[in-house]
Amino acid sequence: MSILIGCAHGTRDADGQATIRRLVEDVRAALPAHDVREAYVDVHGPYVSDVVAELEETDGTTAVVVPLLLAGGYHVYHDIAEAIEDRTDIVSATALGPDPRLIDIVMERVHEAGVPHTATLVLAAAGSSDPRSQADTAAAAEMLRARWDGPVRIGYAAGIHPTVADAVTEARKYGEDGVVAVASFLLAPGFFQKRLGESGADYVTGPLAPHPRLVEIVLDRYRDAGGS
């Protein structure tokens, strides 16, 4: 039976930490006979490299690291990959996105916020200079466009352009219905989510977690990578 290591980014925000732990607990509850562990790539431990090092390679146990990240990128292809590169008993799953179930959650959050159906949506991702991460975010935006009546733009909370605030400004400049909403494409509360509230949008939705669809995606990524 494979160990599932849920690996998130990490945050100093107490609510964000609690939200990620709840997601891990929800996964644990869905796999009651399994060993489910938490790990992080940055900010605080337990760091994924340490969690991997704690597993004895000689005892026949296998493990799957499931990135609790909405897009692939540096943390998946470097940090997690580096942590397991010398281990034949541990594999990494793919990131949670792109996945239409994530857009289900985005749409649910948009409706909860009361956003008018013709408003411009700015899909607000964390941001990464890694083109693979940007491609995953672009794919998510295309999924959202297929389900939303108004325009859909992309904005990033940090690192690269357009920033979320830039995307909001551009939407207003081109008169896209006059109502602009930021649709959070972040997993948990924290510094980036707070930035979304400073973007000047008319509406800002909450982060995706907690949500049962996230648990479904985590379990699918685990099993697709060979977890059992």
Image (spheres, grey):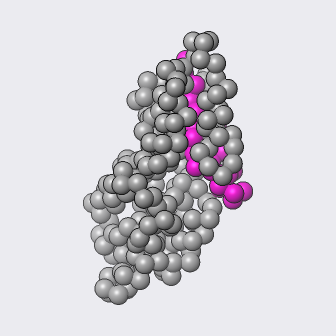
**Where, by quadrant of the figure, is residue 115 drawn?**
bottom left
In this rendering, position of residue 151 left or right of residue 40: left
Q: Could you say which is closer to the camera, residue 118 or residue 23? A: 23
**Where, by quadrant of the figure, is residue 47 drawn?**
top right
Quadrant that contains the N terminus: top right
> Can see residue 216?
no
Residue with the most extreme right position:
14
Answer above or below: position of 51 versus 210. above
Q: Residue at x 57, y 65 (%)?
A: 192
Q: Could you say which is closer to the camera, residue 81 or residue 172? A: 81
Q: Residue at x 44, y 67 (%)?
A: 160
Q: Which residues are magenta?
A: 1-29
> Can see residue 182?
yes
Residue 198, image x, y percentages: 56, 78
Answer above or below: position of 196 versus 15. below
In this rendering, position of residue 147 left or right of residue 188: left
Answer above or below: position of 111 versus 85. below
Residue with the most extreme top position:
59
Q: Residue at x 58, y 25 (%)?
A: 3
Whether the magenta-drawn stretch holds residue 55 is answered as no
